[in-house]
Amino acid sequence: MAEELKERKDMDPAFQWDLTTLYQDDEAWEAAFQELDGKVDAVAAFDGRLTQAGEGSSAGSPQSADETGGGLSGVKASGTVALAAARTIRALLDAETDLDLLLSDLFAYANLRRSEDTRAPQAQKMYARIYAKYVEAVTRTAFAQPQILALPEETLRAAMESEMLAPYHFVMEKLLRQKPHTLSEKEEALLARFGEVFAAPGQIADNLQDADLVFDPVKDAQGQEHELTGSNFILLQTSPDRTLRENAFRSFYKGYRQHINTFASTYAGAVKAAAAEAQVRGYESSRAMSMAGENIPTEVYDTLIGTVRAHLPAMYRYAELRREILGLDELHYYDLYTPLTGSSGRHYTYEQAQQMVLEAVRPLGENYGRIVRRGFDSRWIDVYPNRGKSGGAFSSGTYHSNPFILTNFTGTLDSVSTIAHEMGHSMHTWHSNQAQPPQYAEYTLFVAEVASTVNENLLIEHLLKTEQDPRERLALLNQYLENFKGTVYRQVMFAEFEKKAHEMAERGQALDPESLNSLYEGLVRDYFGPALTMDEEVRYEWARIPHFYRPFYVYKYATGYTSAVALSEAVRNGGDQAVTSYLEFLSMGGSADPLDELRHAGVDLATPAPVHAALEKFERVLAEAQELAGKLS
């Protein structure tokens, strides 16, 4: 497929997502865009009213002594102030929710359109316009949190417990946690004003990678030339043709090396922006600030790294197994993705992929399967790569729309696994939207990778149950091992890179190309061990990881995967109660702290036990792969 990339207009629309469930067309988006200023004005009108409410002067009086908490005049006065504050805060939060829903719809549609073809000027303009409006909205409404938190804590806590704020109780609870780190109203407005500036490094890096970075075409062992793009690079790295893999690897990172100064500057800018915000907000580090939003102790991050490092010998054995099975004198970085079974590795049609996913999720019940089928039949998915299309895959959606999935399906087992993965995200979104009000529908990033990897694991376990051919079974075990490698070991390596890079910036050290390259190269050596022969190009890989521009996100892939191992095992072996608990977890959205949501599902990440258990399973899968490899040889 690498040689046959088409323009989007030449693709079959039956395999493209149907965005009309969000907006009928760009003109409908434009009409909705015109409503945005009014929604912002509605929130901005509350500026100053919170202070008046806290003084009991604007929201009216309670209707009975019971509402004020008793019969004494002092208690009545206190209750009157609290109820007045509660009424005003409720009206404000309702207006903010209404604004957030519109912003979400507008942003999602513009981003989905932009993803279809990153070269398309109309979509680029739409995205730029809504991003600018978002920054304006954040700036104009930045008064809300500091004005709420400026009220006396006694008044706030009494207001929070009132019936008026019952629908927003957890919102208020999270807000009160931020009180020590909330700045004055003017300072919050100033930070909001710089929001677009702080986001610029990530946008520059995205545009450089997706739209401007061009790679030299590469030849395979027969001398046939192949186009190399960001979206087909990993596909070429899975090729059984080692010449093609190496040429693609060297051409790809040649492109990054030529722009490494720019990438280092953009990343340094993103890190310094996070460090500066953390400092002015009174956090001990940018990592602590990032994790505080989800109420995750930093010990969870450090325990994850320490536990994975304790299991690095298993990754070293996997690397050595790769070298042996592939029959290589030296294992290079461009050998890490090709299937262990060489010329095996079946290819599947998109229709076969759909059926495989439907069979895999059967343990989750008939209703779950019906919704997955609806997603396939209703064009939730943009299936095939086209010229200019964003690489990789993602799931996106809003409270008013069905979820949408972008993939670049190529027929490999990994492509099928990607569909299962992204459908897991979409099912999490669908369940949350169905069960929760808008203010609690969006689940946190910490749990965002759980449902996706549960689906992946169910797919692999289903295929292993039915596959008896040793070579094909080894291919499946290879996919399982790759999931662990990519979602636990590599993501924790990325997490350690982020931790150290931010610490360097916070110590005042320069984040120049050499320091970042050396840091990354050292971590690759640590995580892959002596079986890997290092290539000079490896040190540039950090520059192509887009998640680094969302600080301290990547570790959540690993915590999500280790949680998913426990949950998928429970779903397969634990009966109806395990399924019920899991579906309840999917329906919780953001209505509780993520660690508590996972405890409800049966996983406690406050301990290292889930990570240990997951990596012990990795070792069991590795042992079976080694045994099969021995028989095949």
Image (cartoon, helix red, strand yellow):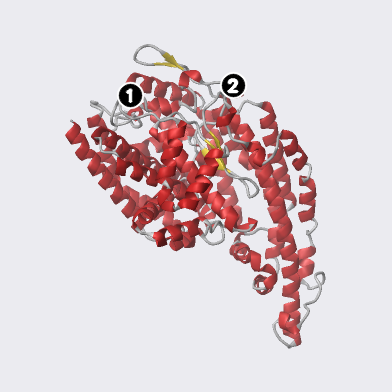
Q: Element under label 1?
A: loop
Number of numbered discs overlaid on the protein picture = 2
Q: Position of residue 55 (x, y in %)?
A: 78, 72
* Mark 1 or mark 2, earlier in chain: 2
Amino acid type, mark 2: Asp
Residue at the spot 25% in from the left edge and 38% down from the top edge: 468
Mark 1 is surrounded, within 10 Å at the Cα level, by few (under 14), some (14 to 19) or many (20 or more) other residues, namely many
Of 590 and 397, which appears nearest the observer?
397
Q: Position of residue 42 (x, y in %)?
A: 79, 54
Residue at the spot 43% in from the left edge and 21% down from the top edge: 251
- The answer to whether residue 445 shows anywhere in this view is yes
Nearest to the eye among marks 1 and 2: give it: 2
Mark 2 is surrounded, within 10 Å at the Cα level, by few (under 14), some (14 to 19) or many (20 or more) other residues, namely few
Of 608 and 170, which appears nearest the observer?
170
Kindly give the residue lying farthest to the top in the view shown: 223
Q: CA distance from mark 1 to mark 2?
A: 30 Å
Q: Position of residue 354 (x, y in %)?
A: 46, 38
Residue at the spot 54% in from the left edge and 42% down from the top edge: 375
Q: Which residue is mark 1?
A: 240
Say above or below: 372 vs 91.
Answer: above
Q: Which residue is mark 2?
A: 10
Q: Look at the numbered discs 1 and 2 and tell me whether their residues touch, using CB distance below 8 Å.
A: no
Q: Element under label 2?
A: helix
Amino acid type, mark 1: Pro
- As drawn, the label of residue 574 is none
Residue 521, image quadrant: top left
- The answer to whether residue 152 shows anywhere in this view is no
- Work out which quarter of the rendered image holds the C terminus and state it: top left
Q: Give left or right: position of 478 versus 218.
A: left
